[in-house]
Amino acid sequence: MKTYDLIKSDLYRYCGEYSLILLLEQLVLNEGFNYMFWLRLAGAASSRPARLVLNHIIRLKQRRYGFVISPRTKIGPGFYISHVGSLVVNPTAVIGANCNISQGVTIGSNHGKAATIGDNVYIGPNVCIVEDVTIGDNVTIGAGSVVTKDIPSNVTVAGCPARILTDDASLNRAARYIMRPWAMQSS
């Protein structure tokens, strides 16, 4: 997906539509969108001077907002940062489309690869996702959870360690916290 389309999908998640006016408004008023805008540009930069400038901007934003996400991190379209606050994502993590991430979240690894997160996943405040786990599609992870094992699709989990609370597919409420999802284009 092109950088323009990724930025457009992120903007859509915040506003439900996209235009140049909304883009400029969200760059000024919304810290989560602002950070992702610059992160997407830094991830796409091909020339060394552009990478240096954009990575410097990212470092300034990291200090200001408390977000630590590398431009190398693979993040799908429609990424939504709920609130400003500590947010750490390991560069080896893979995040799918239409993911919501809240303040205080850590997606980390001390031993190799970090988590792979599916599409339409809501990650509540203060969640820790530890090491190389796989989180399925349409998952809700409750506040304060510690995820140490794989999570199947269409469930709600919570706790320390995280346990399955409900099967959301059978209750017809999978991905219920994903507002304004970006429609994935078929290739």
Image: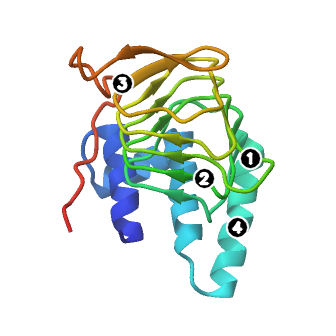
At horizontal 42% and vertical 35% (from top left) the residue drawn is 121
Compare residues 167 and 104 and report the one nearer the observer: 167
Question: Type of residue at label 3?
Answer: Tyr
* CA neighbours of label 3 inside 10 A, class few (<14), some (14 to 19), many (20+): some
Question: Type of residue at label 2?
Answer: Ala
At mark 3, the secondary structure is loop
Question: Type of residue at label 4?
Answer: Asn
At mark 1, the secondary structure is loop
Q: Position of residue 104 (x, y in %)?
A: 68, 28
At mark 4, the secondary structure is helix
Residue tagged by mark 3? Answer: 177
Residue tagged by mark 4? Answer: 55
* CA neighbours of label 1 inside 10 A, class few (<14), some (14 to 19), many (20+): some
* CA neighbours of label 4 inside 10 A, class few (<14), some (14 to 19), many (20+): many
Say whether residue 26 is left or right of residue 49: left
Tags 2 and 3 in contact by the CB under 8 Å rule?
no
Could you tell me how far apart the alpha carbons at marks 2 and 1 are, in whole angstroms? 9 Å
Tags 1 and 3 in contact by the CB under 8 Å rule?
no
Say which label, 3 or 4, has the lower sequence index: 4
Q: Please give the label number shown on residue 93.
A: 2
* CA neighbours of label 2 inside 10 A, class few (<14), some (14 to 19), many (20+): many
At horizontal 61% and vertical 87% (from top left) the residue drawn is 47
Q: Position of residue 40 (x, y in %)?
A: 51, 63
Residue tagged by mark 1? Answer: 109
Q: How is the image coloured?
A: rainbow
Q: Position of residue 111 (x, y in %)?
A: 79, 51
Say whether residue 174 is left or right of residue 155: left
Picture quadrant where residue 72 is located = bottom right
Say which label, 1 or 3, has the lower sequence index: 1
